[in-house]
Amino acid sequence: MADKYLNLVNSALGKTAAKKLGLPRPAHLRRYQPGAPLVPGPVLVVGAGAGADAAATTVLDWGLDVRRHADPRGKYGAVILALDEVAHPDDLSGPVLEAAAALKRLRPGGRMVTISRPAEAENDPATAAARQGVDGLLRSIAHELRGGATGNGILLGPDAAPSSSSVAGALHFLLSGRSAYVDGQFLRVDGDGATIPADWDKPLSGKVAVVTGAAQGIGAAIARTLRRDGADVVVVDIPPAGESLAEVANAVQGTALQLDITADDAGRRILDHALGRHGRLDIMVHNAGITRDKLLANMDESRWTSVLQVNIAAQLRINEQLLGSGQLSEAPRIVSLASTSGIAGNRGQTNYAASKAGIIGMVRASAGQLADSGGTINAVAPGFIETAMTARMPMATRQVARRLSSLQQGGRPGDVAETVAFLASDAAGGISGQVVRVCGQNMVGA
Ligand code: NAD
């Protein structure tokens, strides 16, 4: 559904009125366009040490204009703030204040990306304090940025070298328009399982992907995005959705499989279809999901059971069949749709939140099993997305929900699809067992 307020405040008259009245002024986001520049201007890399040097070399290799010192008159497309070597909160001051001055000159749609290490229990207290400090810092920066600019962080796991392809893959995503609605989040990178694609505009060339619940909404957007990125796509949905499913399959030049994912042999049938019609299966996207909202006090068994069955039990069974078959391609990718309701809870959604939190538990616990084959499994947690579901909300509730994020607007199905496509790519090989929120830094569960 169109956000008329967003269009209004971006008109000449609306802009002035909203400014005078102190109303929210959401900006048109810089979304990915094949062939468009990665960032809207020079990249300033702040910080000394391995993280800063590696980031500068990486972005220079991508042909970007890189600066190592803030110019008081310069305009920037992105600021990379490397804090991977901080060992005391005092170490934050110099680089943070240098980056602060440059943030005023970040172009609309610009990017701020921190590179740091996670605070672990075994760190000495001062190091842990400095590292955890980056968490609060980055999340606050993201709240402060305007003009559609976003702030996100990369966390280097103990075995992730700053110069690794895994870090480069995460950095490319966060700088690009693909992450337009990802804000205030950290991507943790471990190991060096990533491969940089030969063509950043076709990172899924040669891959075969399956998307469940693809007859409409976010699933259909995921199918289109995976196809745009070069994958052959199998779209799955229940038989009553067969007609729209066939339309999506035609649009993405893929094949359709009518299947209720709660069937006992759903995993086997998905595999047989993908292998039989496309010769391989590299990417499994578990998108199908349902809501049957009711306060828990009024919850009946059918509402509870159906949501748990479709949203989590079916995925567990399908994954078991796929992984147990030994027939997936090398380094397979599994991406599941969670929800911010599964992180923060939501009134009337005990069943849904339990199922979506279950997905988060599932991906964390499955990462080790996939690692042996170079595979990854991750969850994407959308916030308020402009779909048929959110269009049915009462107008006032919808308006409030839209403005409750740092980007002051709802996301689009395509925004969720971009993050799914990134996690499905070889460039995301260093990311597994994680939950990436696509929520514009919504205050819900922030
Ligand atoms: P939607 O209702 O528009 O589409 C879901 C699709 O799943 C439908 O085509 C439906 O037929 C299919 N489906 C349902 N049960 C199935 C089954 N048993 N087997 C096969 N297919 C089945 O939903 P959406 O808004 O596009 O959401 C997609 C996913 O994103 C869901 O998992 C949802 O929980 C999650 N999500 C959505 C939002 C949002 O704002 N729309 C927010 C957070 C999370």
Image (tube, rainbow, N blue to C red):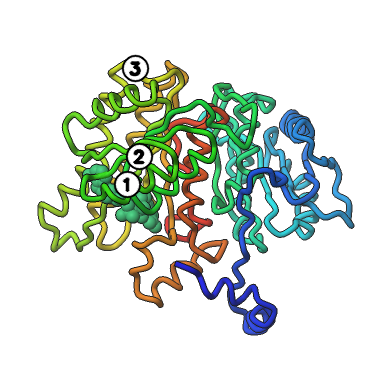
The crowding category of the residue bearing disc 1, from other C-alpha atoms within 10 Å (few below 14, some 14 to 19, many at least 20), is many
Foreground of the two, 138 or 377? 377
Amino acid carrying label 2: it is Val
All told, the count of numbered labels is 3
Q: Earlier in the sequence, mark 1 or mark 2?
A: 2
* Residue 88 spot, x, y in % from top left: 68, 39
Q: Would residue 364 appear left or right of 312 to someone viewing this image?
A: right
Rendered view: 198 above or below 357: above
* Residue 114 spot, x, y in % from top left: 66, 43
Q: Kindly check if marks 1 and 2 are in contact, taking CB atoms under 8 A apart as contact.
A: yes
| Residue at 26%, 52% in the rendered image | 290
Q: Which mark is residue 327?
A: 3
Q: Which residue reaches farthest left?
A: 301
* Residue 76 spot, x, y in % from top left: 79, 52
Q: Earlier in the sequence, mark 3 or mark 2?
A: 2
Q: Which mark is residue 102?
A: none
* Residue 362 spot, x, y in % from top left: 33, 34
Q: Disc 3 and disc 1: Cα gap in Å?
A: 26 Å
| Residue at 32%, 38% in the rendered image | 256
Q: Disc 3 and disc 2: Cα gap in Å?
A: 19 Å
Q: Kindly check if marks 3 and 2 are in contact, taking CB atoms under 8 A apart as contact.
A: no
| Residue at 25%, 62% in the rendered image | 348
Q: Nearer the viewer, mark 3 or mark 2?
A: 2
Secondary structure, mark 3, is: loop
Q: Which mark is residue 245?
A: 1
| Beta carbon at label 1 within 8 Å of ligand 1 | yes
Amino acid carrying label 3: it is Gln
Q: Which mark is residue 235?
A: 2
Rendered view: 185 above or below 161: below
